[in-house]
Each structure stands twice: as C-alpha cells, then as structure tokens.
Amino acid sequence: MRLPLSLKMANRNYQDAVQALNSLQSNYANIMAIRASGDRKNMMNIWEMQEWSRRIGYSVSDFNKLNVIHITGTKGKGSTAAFTQGILNQYKDTLSKVGLYTSPHLRSVRERIRINGEPITEELFSKYFFEVWDRLDETSSNEDKFPHMTEGQKPGYFKYLTLLSFHVFMQEGCGTCIYEVGVGGEFDSTNIIEKPTVCGVSALGIDHTFMLGNTIEEIAWNKGGIFKEGAPAFTVKSQPKTGSQVLQERAAERHTTLSEVPIFEHLKTIKLGIAGDFQIKNASLATALAHQHLVSLDILKEPLELASSAKIPDLFRKGLEQTVWEGRCQIIRSNNITWYIDGAHTKESIEAASGWFRDVTATFNRKKVLLFNQQSRDAKALLGYLYETISPAVEFDAAIFTTNVTWKTGNYSADLVSLNTSKEQVDKLEVQQNLQKEWILLNETEHRNVEVTSSIEAALDLIKNMGEPVDVFVTGSLHLVGGFLVVLDGKPT
C-alpha cells in the first residue's frame, strides 16, 4: 500500500501512523480462508522478514547487538517477559537501555515497544514508523524469490511492528532486548534473531491450532523453534510430559541445553508485582532468564543454581516486586466498584484467572458481576472452564456479554481498531447472544440477570447504574481488557 499524498508530508503525526498501521491488518475473510485451507506458516515467513530487514537497511546479523532474550510459550510468556524486564531494569546503569517487544497492546500500540519499561513516545513512534514505511517504498525485492513482496507491498500488521521494533531498538542504542514471540516460534516473525543470549518457554497448552497444530507435541515443536546453538534455554517445570520431550529433542537438534526451572522458595517471601499465585512460576522462569543473560554479558559471574532453595539476588527480588503489567490479575478500585481484570483467553489462563478471582473475592459480601467476551476463539468452552473453576465458591449475581467495540457510538478507539473479526457477526451480537444462552444453561438463571451489550461503554454504564458495592470480573480477551481500560479512563480517541 502506498500512502496518500497527505501522509507523505513532513508533519506526519502519531494518528497518521496508527491509520497507516491499521491498513496493514488482514481482514476477517482472509484469515478465515487461511484457516480453512490449513495453510500453516513456513520458512518463507522467515525469509521475507530477513528481506524486509534488508530493505530498511539491516543485515539480520546486525540485530545481534541487541543481545536478545527470546521468550515463547502458550500461557504466561507476556508476564515472564514483563518480570524479566522488571529485573533487568534494576541493572540499567550497567545495561543502559533495555528494550521490550510484546503483543498485543491494551490501550496504545506504543505499549508493544518499550524502553526501560516505558512505551516509546508518540513522537518517537511516528518518527521511526515513517522511516520504515518510506524505506520500504524506496526499495524493492526480487519478485521471483519473494512473490508476496511486490512493489508498494508492506508487511502485515504484526510483521511491520516487529520490523519497527528492530529499527527502534537499533536506533535508540538498546544493548539488551526482550522479545516475546507472537505465535509459536519456528516461523514467527521475531525468529530471525540469530544469536539470542538465552531463550525461555513458559507453560505449554493448546492454542492457535490452525497455525501450530492440534497436539501438544506439534505445538511444542513450534515453540522449540526459537532455540539457537550456544544460547541456553530454560522452561518451567510441570510441562506436559510429551511436550517436554519434544522441547528436549528440539534443544538437542539446535545444539543447546534446555533446563527446567523450579519454583524458587525465596520468591514466596515477596509480593510479586503481578498478582496471582500462579505467577510465581513465571517469575521463577524470568529469574533464570535474566540471570543467564547477565552472566552472558559478564555482569554476573556465577550461574544460578537451579534448585528451589537457590538464593535470589536482592536486585532481582526488587525488580519482581516492582513489575507492572496491566490486564493480568489487575485490581482497580473506583468508588463502590472493584474491578478484577485479566485478559485470559486460553483454557489454562482462564482457569488460573478464575481461580484468582474466586480466591480473592469468595469471602466478600458484595454483588458479583461477570463482564466477558471472546470474539474469535471457542468462547463457549472458555465460559465453561470459567464456570467450573469458580463454582460453587462464587456465584455471580449478573453477567454481561459485550463486543469489543469501545464506544456506544459504534466506534473503536483508534489504537484498538480490529479487522480480524467478522463485522457482521459483531453487529448482530451473535457471539454475545450465544454466550448469554450458554450462561443461562450453566447457571439456570433468569434472562433478566444476563445482559448483552453492543459496546464496552454500554456495559460499564449498566454496572455503574447498579448503585451498590460490586466486584466485577473482566475477562476472556485482552482486546476486551484494552477497550475496558480506555473506557474506564473516559478519554474517547
């Protein structure tokens, strides 16, 4: 896509960048066609990312300067990345700038590209965004080798942001970068990194089957694709047995080691910055990754003992305590409403988040409300897992099923526009009405206690009008959580 003349002017701003970025999203029909065809990603995905990098002025080997920590997994990879960043930020006097690339974002796309814990500014985002855009417009590829990279073509949404992150971190002089894999690992666009300092795999589960496969073994094979020769790899204990075996095989193929990380007892004595008892597993993995990274840079001299009794450095403990990661076991108190927020969207994560809400609120004598959506995965199954986990300890007095549309006007916040779902399905509230029926069957409740809304703003109005103390569990989707936080801020964009 080529920009209109108005967007080629020197005064292009952040909103112009977001508009151009949104134009790179795959539409719903295209995604469904890929799923139906069974076409899974292959090496062309990696070759194209290497070529895009060349087009904007980099050899892939240039990115070795970033000293990347590469993290994949099904559940907890984002939290692990955040904890790793929290630890390494305690060493920023030595490390200088620490970059973090994650997905998806909640309020603003800038959250995906952070330096020293902070999203890059709108000015930096738009500056570097259009530098990449213009370089792609000014260069070309051999169309025989790269038939999907014709003149004027740009990478898709996630690939573009990955490319942008490399450019930002290189230009800003980041000497340590943490990369969270988007989907899988083997063919993910982040996997052009040749020499990471260390790799990590959080808990495995079944997700993104149309791209990664239907079994835990196939998914583990994909995740293990980030392993590189000479870069130690770490994973959490208690992985599915067959998945763990595949990860070990992948490590052997790549001529590296894979070590299991226990839960460190010392971490049980601190209050982690991300709530939820299950987060100690992610914090332990982050501890191992950060420690190995610092050893590889010769900042720490001794490897970490992988025993539950291992002594954890004080700076590590401080970093884990100060980690902030919105939308994961987050609590916000506003007047007489307490919001319990987690963007869980897989079986494992919805069970963990539901257990957290149950354990925290079961003894509170307040009304309980569920605010839920999941637009693209098996929403009814997720709702069932939630109900099984939370009952009978907690009974909801009401449930609201909303779309991810931000405002009652029918508009999305600019950074949250999504073309990856069926507009017709959203407009007709098909998913929400099916969830309403499912919840009534699960709870044997009356229809009046189960509402459907066409926007997140409308859902929040219903809750605020209840006029009494209430605990609200917001879950099912990070897209829902992002829109919820924007509406709660009350700042239409």
Image (spheres, rainbow, N blue to C red):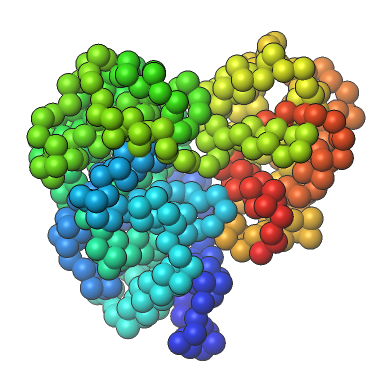
Give above or below for 9 relative to 372.
below
Residue 372: x and y, percent? 68, 35
Residue in the image at 61% along x and 59% along y: 417
Residue 192: x and y, percent? 24, 54
**Total count of labels:** 0
Residue 272: x and y, percent? 43, 29
Left or right relative to 258: residue 410: right
Left or right relative to 366: residue 319: left
Residue in the image at 25% along x and 45% along y: 91
The quadrant in which the C terminus is found is: bottom right
Residue 21: x and y, percent? 49, 67
Q: Which of the 4 quarters of the picture holds residue 255?
A: top left
Left or right relative to 260: residue 17: right
Report whether residue 72 is seen: no
Query: Which residue is at the front of the view, 462 or 220?
Result: 462
Report whether residue 446 is seen: yes
Residue in the image at 35% along x and 52% along y: 116
Residue at the top extreme? 392
Residue in the image at 44% along x and 49% along y: 103
Q: Which of the 4 quarters of the picture holds residue 169?
A: bottom left
Give above or below for 211 relative to 241.
below
Query: Which residue is at the front of the view, 217 or 287?
Result: 287
